[in-house]
Amino acid sequence: MEQNNSNNSLLAEIEELRQQLEEATDTIQAIRTGQVDALVVKDTDGHQLYTLKTADQTYRVFIEKMNEGAATINREGIVLYCNTRFALMVDAPLEDVIGMPILSFVPEKAKEKLQALIDDSWEDDCKKEITIKDGGEKDMHCLFSCTTIELDSGTALSLIITDLTILKATEKELKLRNEQLEEARSVTESLNESLEATVKERTHDLTISREHFKLLTNNIVQMTWTNLPDGNVNAYNQRWYDYTGLDFAATGGFGWTDLIHPDDLAETAAKYTASLQSGEMFEVENRYRRHDGVYRWHLNRSQPLRNDEGEIIFWVGTATDIEDQKREMERKDEFIGIASHELKTPLTSLKGYLQLMAAYKKEELPAAIKNYVTKAGGSLNKLQSLINDLLDVSKIKAGGLEYNIADVNVNHLIGLCMENAMLMYPHFAFSSHAGQNYIIRGNQERLEQVLMNLVNNAVKYSYVNKTVEIDTARHGNYVRISVIDKGIGLSHDQKNKIFERFYRVEDKKNMASGLGMGLYISHEIIQNHKGRIGVESEPGKGSTFYIELPLAEG
Ligand code: ADP
């Protein structure tokens, strides 16, 4: 009996619990669907009433604080509720928004679009970008997200409105930046392309110019080379290899020195080193050994190539074969030697006969004949001095002039020349300043020849100002004798060449007679006296030719 009682009470308890569960499920469903907003719950303190106000409050605060606008509209599109943010977005007081058609807050052109969105959203959740009136000049781009909600009064449509202005502005900015980037990229690309084209063009030009250079150097008759500032040769043209029969390994660097005639090596090496040190042009005549062992004369010239800073990058040199010219010169010298020698004998007898004629006493010679004899004597003297010069030149070439050395008094030497000059050129004004009694060791006749040559030139090349001055001065252990004129003068280039054999300045306007031998012979004579000869000159202003001779000791 007792057993039955307990079973029954258990079943009753289960039934009660089942009912409670059903009740709870219904309540939850009611809360979920919004059918109730308050419920009575029995707990240890008895029955309590819970409203959903608390939760509703939370959501209201949440919606109020949202950055997005929020609005609820009914089927007619009337705003039932909106948050402050939305009111701000449309720039109207909250109370003026509620109760108004939502379409009144969008510009005319967007109305149709919003209506379509609303219509679609009653069926299903929808989103669309739509502009709203922000109350000011500009419209505001917004994203409308719509969803239906069930209210006591029926179904409503909730709209969440997100302001896209910043997003749009950012997008616009981003677009602008992208466009700028794109523009910069295309500019860079085109720059790159033009740079590439320039590089290509330059490389092409360079290749062409290198090929040109190669073609040129390989086709010119000279041998050419380039060497570094330290003297090492780093390239030759084909002519060099053809001539020497050797390759770069044998002749590069300083290997070329083995090919120079032993007699020319010292001078070549000295001039080469001097040029490398001074940076001035290298020029020397020497003999190079050919592949068959024959030596041929060459004229070497090398010029430095400098960068913008003036530093030497490398030297470009050429060697011109002058063997044939040398032979020609030798033949010419030989001819001059023979001819002048041959001319000298009849000239001497001619001079003798003229002297006899001048001294004829038996009867008085007619004045005209006397005059002719004097003139013939003058011409003969000129001829004789030319022949003497020619003989001197060929003697120099054949091994040098002969000198009898003795003490020479400089004042005496100058006195003799002055006397001579005044007789020869009576229309010229000569002056001299006797210095100390300088004594030098030398050959009186040869030194007279030098001084007279300088005086003759001073007269010959002074067409207007007819004054010549002879000065003496001591320079250390040397005495310097200067012959100063106010004639046509010389340019820098001419000054460097006038001591060369047969060199004459080309001056068609004022061509004085001469063969370009005087200064060459003078130079040779002064060198033999261990002295120096030189010139200071300016075109149109005159020249000062000077010789410096070592003073005799003691
Ligand atoms: P030349 O017989 O031609 O005078 P030189 O050897 O004496 O031969 O002189 C060489 C050249 O130097 C001359 O042709 C002339 O052009 C130039 N020269 C020499 N002396 C003078 C001078 N005093 N003034 C100007 N030019 C001069």
Image (spheres, grey):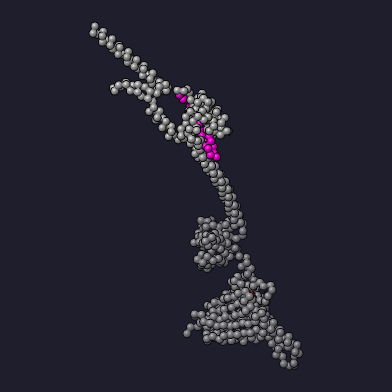
Image quadrant where one finds the N terminus: top left
Residue 448's image quarter?
A: bottom right
In the image shown, does 455 or 180 lie closer to the viewer?
Answer: 180
Q: Is residue 497 visible?
A: no
Residue at left offset 53%, top offset 78%: 531
Quarter for ligand 1?
bottom right
Q: Is residue 431 visible?
A: yes
Residue at left offset 50%, top offset 37%: 91
In the image shown, does 487 or 124 lie closer to the viewer?
Answer: 124
In the rendered structure, the answer to whether residue 54 lies left or right of residue 299 reads left
Which residue of the protein is positioned furthest toward the front in this rendering? 95
In the image shown, does 268 or 72 lie closer to the viewer?
Answer: 72
Residue 480's image quarter?
A: bottom right
Residue 219 % position (x, y):
62, 57
Magenta includes 144?
yes
Residue 96 % position (x, y):
50, 33
Residue 20 % position (x, y):
34, 17
Number of disc labels:
0
31 up-or-down from 204: above or below = above
Range of magenta residues: 132-151
Magenta includes 417?
no
- What kind of secondary structure does the magenta stretch mostly adopt? strand
Residue at left offset 48%, top offset 32%: 95
Residue 545 % position (x, y):
58, 78
In the rendered structure, the answer to whether residue 194 lies left or right of residue 339 reads left
Which residue of the protein is positioned furthest toward the left in this rendering? 2
222 up-or-down from 66: above or below = below
In the image shown, does 497 or 28 lie closer to the viewer?
Answer: 28
Residue at left offset 53%, top offset 33%: 105
